[in-house]
């Protein structure tokens, strides 16, 4: 059985104190705890500081174009639904450049797990504002403060049909690892929104900011209650409070590939059956 | 019908009348009579209103182009007459409803048929007008109504017997009226006795003719190639492919995805291809524009993908339902950075059937994008191909996945996805899921083991490795153009590519009747081009005429860029319409008479 260390590739190049260190560690711990091997799962890394994990985590992977990781993962899952498909990407990639793919992946309830690194900035391009930044956030590209209101990945996912949404804090590694495993074992679209301080460029949403503003969902929170989850995902905007844990998990919702009768066997590994002969009558 | 004679039937009506259904019906009827056909439809990018037409070119011998003169024009409205009268000859049949309009002409043979009255007598719905016009057409062309009755039965049996009965009654009414009133005008171009050797006693063809459009042929080719994943966002004129693939998906065991946009389309296909499914996408120029960044990703990460690009006139939204060959240079140069890419351009249905499976093989062998260039003319026009020939073409195809492997090649060594390959540039591609290995399809420049790199020497090694694949392709799989006619004997050489093939073939026949010998150099492997093997084709001392359906002679530019061969004489057409054989004939006659005066 693989250990977390078996998933460790190159030494990461993240800034000292970056939330990615603990997220990367949590992913490797979680993969090992689930009994996976680097050769038994598919990962897709988007572009950005988080996506640079491509060289630090060992797995069959795609290092996608910016914003396109979710689309790659959908294709992977439809062709190899017997393997996990895990997406690593930032708020800019998944909600900015690739927002359309995100929205439609939720609608389709594709069985992929998305770890969304939510740090409100574009770290790799030196700190411009991200779509999740709070209104008024100043950055190199928004010196007068951002005019747009923040987009919420959790709210978007929940309202567009995602069947599992959770929020984690990069400062709480054990919980993050558990939530990743919960998302991956869930069948259907799962989103783990990770609150991640960017120690170099974001001086607002720091470790201490999130330590003060986040809280654990109480034991009585029922993740199967959609309305309750909908109220919870609005708290960051109305009360500047960040609930941690599984916000919502649908029961008995089929994933996309489960609704295709032809995918009883994985598309790639099934035997060749394609036969054009009966199709010719169609053209006579 | 004399074997060299051909007959053009055309129908026109406002959009929404069902002209498409009627036209395809006429094509299938022609094939069921044992006759060959080529059809062509013109329609605006609308669902209701506007003007729709459909023409079927009928011939005893195989035919692959339309022609200018119309022999029978069915006018379901007055516009049809005004828009197409310039293409009628003195013995053309002009079919119209006298209650609708009176052409007031003696230039042609008038065939007034009271369509609406016949429908009223039967209490049939307006939509059955199609059947009246098909019935009347069969009578005028010497066809057999039983084929139409049978076709109606095939088409509507699942709906209800009542629908079958009313459509057959409408067809019969049109047939009987035309036969009784205009029997003397009948042009027996569908006469079964002329092709009796092709039919059995019951009138069934020994070797039925299939009626295939380019999009159908691509779909069949993809199935024969064992392609398992097709994604698209609807865009004319490629849209019928996703409809066909989706209809076949469950039975054929493939996934047909209508994704959110063309960027999603190609990236889903790349995901499926990365883990080992043969994958393709279909689109037209605008959608292709959205895909090119991802094409570049496929190039650097060495992911096989087939892109079916059915061209229409651009720029931008352009003329969505018309035809042009305006995206060749864009396809050749589409994608940032330098990476290998192969472009194939079939010229007709048989070449689409042959080159589609080849494209999937080439994508796997060279682990890079392969584009199949079609255009509206090829994608949506049908022509007749014997079922036996379709079988033969598709079954001779063998799936060749090149250096694709499903097990790690060296048990004790690390698997190197992008291992240098000094011989051919191609590295063994291990499919994800194989035990004891892992790698990434990296969009960054990478080391042989697939990790990201910015090292100068590694960069050069990988660039050279990838570009070596194209050298290998040119030596191994590039096909020189086919020459129809003899370059040694010809007075002129016609040079073209893709879907102009049928029109040029036909023009060669017309020019032969004018006493002019021609040779036609027909390219299907349009990018990259092999300078060494092409030079001899252009070494003759005779005029070379470049024929393209665009305004800038894009293939001419590509040929000059890649081989240094320059073709100054050009016939370029870019009004959204296909090139007519007669236009080629006229241009050649003019060019040769100018040459002889010099």
Image (cartoon, rainbow, N blue to C red):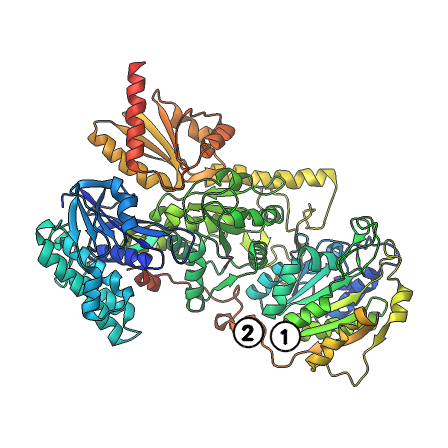
Q: Quarter of the image for the C terminus of chain B: give it.
A: top left
Residue B98 placement (x, y as % from top left) = 19, 55
Q: In the shown orientation, is residue B388 left or right of residue A201?
A: left
Q: Are marks 1 and 2 in contact (CB under 8 Å)?
A: yes
Q: Which residue is mark 2?
A: A258
- Between B79 and A125, which is closer to the camera in this rendering? B79
Q: Which residue is mark 1?
A: A187
Q: Quadrant of residue B19?
A: bottom left
Around disc 2, counting alpha carbons within 10 Å, would you say few (fewer than 14), some (14 to 19), or many (20 or more)?
some
Pointer 2 chain: A
- Between B459 and A244, which is closer to the camera in this rendering? A244
Pointer 1 chain: A
Write the residue at 75% across / 67% down: A193
Chain-order first, disc 1 or disc 2:
1
- Between A175 and B377, which is closer to the camera in this rendering? B377
Q: Quadrant of residue B26?
A: bottom left
């Amino acid at each position: 059985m693989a250990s977390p260390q078996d998933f460790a590739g190159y030494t990461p190049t993240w800034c000292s104190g970056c939330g990615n260190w603990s997220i990367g560690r949590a992913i490797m711990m979680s993969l090992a705890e689930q009994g996976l091997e680097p050769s038994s799962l598919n990962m897709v890394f988007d572009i950005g500081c988080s996506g640079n994990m491509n060289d630090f985590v060992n797995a069959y992977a795609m290092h996608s174009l910016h914003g396109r990781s979710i689309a790659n993962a959908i294709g992977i899952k439809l062709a190899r639904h017997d393997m996990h498909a895990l997406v690593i990407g930032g708020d800019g990639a998944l909600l900015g450049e690739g927002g359309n793919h995100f929205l439609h992946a939720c609608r389709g309830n594709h069985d992929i797990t998305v770890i969304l690194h939510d740090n409100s900035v574009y770290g790799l391009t030196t700190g411009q504002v991200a779509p999740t930044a709070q209104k008024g956030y100043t950055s190199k590209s928004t010196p007068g403060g951002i005019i747009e209101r923040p987009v919420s990945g959790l709210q978007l996912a929940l309202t567009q049909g995602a069947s599992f949404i959770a929020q984690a804090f990069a400062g709480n590694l054990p919980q993050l690892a558990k939530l990743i495993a919960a998302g991956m074992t869930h069948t259907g679209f799962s989103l783990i929104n990770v609150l991640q301080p960017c120690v170099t460029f974001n001086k607002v949403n720091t470790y201490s900011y999130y330590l003060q503003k986040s809280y654990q969902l109480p034991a009585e929170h029922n993740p199967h209650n959609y309305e309750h989850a909908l109220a919870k995902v609005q708290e960051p905007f109305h009360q500047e409070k960040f609930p941690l844990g599984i916000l919502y998990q649908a029961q008995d919702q089929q994933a996309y590939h489960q609704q295709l009768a032809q995918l009883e066997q994985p598309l790639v590994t099934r035997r060749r059956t394609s036969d054009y002969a009966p199709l010719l009558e169609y053209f006579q | 019908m004399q074997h060299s004679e051909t007959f053009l039937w055309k129908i026109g009506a406002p959009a929404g009348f069902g002209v498409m259904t009627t036209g395809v019906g006429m094509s299938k009827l022609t094939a069921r009579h044992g006759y060959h056909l080529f059809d062509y439809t013109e329609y605006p990018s609308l669902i209701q209103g506007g003007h729709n037409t459909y023409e079927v070119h009928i011939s005893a011998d195989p035919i692959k182009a339309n022609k200018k003169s119309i022999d029978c024009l069915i006018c379901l409205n007055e516009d049809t007459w005004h828009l197409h009268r310039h293409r009628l000859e003195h013995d053309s049949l002009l079919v119209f409803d006298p209650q609708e309009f009176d052409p007031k002409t003696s230039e042609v043979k008038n065939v007034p048929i009271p369509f609406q009255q016949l429908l009223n007598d039967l209490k049939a719905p307006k939509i059955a007008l199609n059947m009246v016009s098909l019935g009347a057409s069969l009578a005028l062309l010497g066809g057999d109504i039983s084929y139409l009755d049978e076709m109606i039965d095939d088409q509507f049996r699942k709906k209800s017997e009542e629908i079958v009965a009313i459509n057959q009654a409408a067809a019969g009414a049109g047939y009987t009226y035309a036969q009784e009133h205009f029997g003397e005008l009948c042009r027996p171009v569908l006469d079964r006795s002329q092709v009796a050797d092709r039919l059995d006693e019951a009138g069934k063809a020994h070797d039925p003719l299939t009626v295939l459009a380019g999009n159908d042929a691509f779909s069949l080719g993809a199935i024969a190639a064992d392609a398992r994943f097709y994604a698209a966002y609807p865009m004319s004129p490629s849209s019928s492919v996703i409809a066909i693939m989706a209809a076949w998906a469950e039975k054929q065991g493939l996934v047909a995805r209508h994704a959110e946009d063309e960027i999603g389309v190609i990236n889903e296909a790349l995901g499926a291809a990365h883990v080992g499914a043969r994958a393709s996408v279909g689109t037209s120029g605008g959608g292709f524009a959205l895909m090119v960044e991802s094409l570049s990703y496929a190039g650097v990460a060495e992911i096989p993908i087939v892109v079916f690009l059915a061209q229409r006139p651009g720029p931008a939204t352009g003329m969505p339902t018309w035809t042009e060959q305006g995206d060749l240079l864009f396809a050749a140069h589409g994608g940032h950075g330098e990476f290998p890419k192969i472009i194939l351009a079939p010229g007709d249905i048989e070449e689409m059937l042959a080159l589609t499976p080849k494209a999937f093989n080439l994508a796997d062998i060279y682990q890079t994008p392969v584009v199949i260039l079609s255009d509206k003319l090829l994608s949506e026009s049908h022509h007749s191909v014997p079922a036996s020939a379709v079988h033969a073409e598709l079954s001779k195809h063998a799936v060749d996945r090149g250096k694709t492997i499903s097990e790690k090649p060296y048990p004790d060594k690390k698997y190197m996805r992008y291992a240098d390959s000094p011989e051919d540039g191609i590295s063994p591609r291990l499919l994800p899921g194989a035990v004891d290995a892992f790698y990434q399809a990296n969009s960054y420049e990478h080391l042989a083991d697939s990790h990201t790199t910015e090292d100068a020497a590694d960069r050069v090694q990988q660039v050279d490795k990838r570009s070596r694949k194209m050298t290998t392709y040119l030596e191994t799989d590039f096909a020189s153009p086919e020459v129809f006619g003899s370059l040694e004997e010809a007075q002129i050489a016609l040079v073209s590519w893709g879907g102009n093939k049928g029109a040029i073939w036909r023009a060669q026949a017309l020019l032969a009747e004018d006493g002019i010998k021609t040779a036609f150099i027909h390219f299907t492997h349009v990018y990259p081009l092999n300078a060494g093997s092409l030079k001899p084709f252009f070494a003759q001392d005779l005029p070379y005429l470049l024929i393209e359906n665009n305004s800038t002679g894009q293939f001419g530019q590509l040929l000059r860029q890649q081989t240094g061969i320059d073709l100054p004489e050009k016939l370029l057409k870019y009004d959204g319409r296909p090139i007519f054989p007669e236009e080629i004939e006229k241009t050649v006659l003019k060019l040769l008479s100018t040459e002889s005066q010099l």
